[in-house]
Image: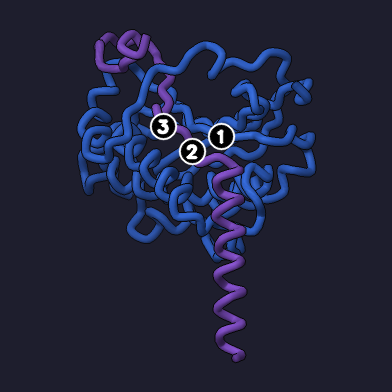
Chain colours: A purple, B blue
Amino acid sequence: GQSDRSPSSLGDRKVVLLPCRSAPSREKVQVWLQARKQFQHLQQERHFT
Amino acid sequence: MATLTRQDLNFGQVVADILCEFLEVAIHLILYVREVYPSGIFQKRKKYNVPVQMSCHPELNQYIQDTLHCVKPLIEKNEAEKVVVVIMDKEHHPVERFVFEISQPPLLSISSDTLLSHVEQLLRAVILKISVCDAVLDNNPPGCTFTVLVYTREAATRNMEKIQVIKDFPWIVADEQEVHMQGSRLIPLKTMTSDIVKMQLYVEERAQKAS
């Protein structure tokens, strides 16, 4: 369980740690990128009209 | 030539600042070169006097910053043996591990004008090696993600506890499957030796990347 993996029980053996949270997924980043491109495109259109 | 201990001049803090700034650049570049994220989120910047690719995705940037903020107290106390950027396939099995092996000398020998001047030059060489590492690595399968591992000692994790709470960014002990890769080959990328830090960078690549 999660509590067994807590790094707070202190000894001096070697341990490997990693963040609980995951990095944003590629899909999530891709959606953000598409939205950003659309926003920039709209801004450009507005600028020229 | 003066000899200083780690306690002088906040030596550990200076090294941690330098290394964390370097690791931030290195992580962004690895994610770009290994195509973990779409290339459209990366912008060209100049670091260590060479062009590098840095993400402009706010959540990803924050994630990398939070990760390194938590690692920093370990580096400051010379308690981070390795920092590893792991690229994982869709099943969360490692396909590549970029291993930064760090060691710091207990004593620092400096002359008045050479404390940091050489370090930037050495870090630049490491960055340049990362930027061309795709030439010696196989393509990764689609849908990869990444995480960062820190190799330390259990007692040293006390130094991370405060920052984990402040940043609301908790860490746990990694599972065996998150750490080990079966049938991997090792590709040395660069070794640097300076007055304040020694670092070895190599990649462990899984032999069969297609899952």
Query: Looking at the rendered structure, which numbered label has been put on residue A21?
Result: 3
* Amino acid at circle 1: Phe
| Pick the front one: B8 or B90 | B90
Name above or below for residue B182 compared with residue B57. above
Q: Chain of mark 3?
A: A
Q: Identify residue for label 2.
A: A23
Residue found at x 59% / y 35%: B145
| Pick the front one: B60 or B189 | B60
Check disc 2: other Cα within 10 Å, few if <14, some if 14-19, many if 20+.
Answer: some
* Amino acid at circle 2: Ala
* Separation of residues labelled 3 and 2 (CA atoms): 7 Å
Residue found at x 62% / y 24%: B94
Residue found at x 39% / y 27%: A20
Q: Identify residue for label 1.
A: B146
Quarter of the rendering containing residue B87:
top right
Is the C-beta separation of discs 1 and 2 under 8 Å? yes
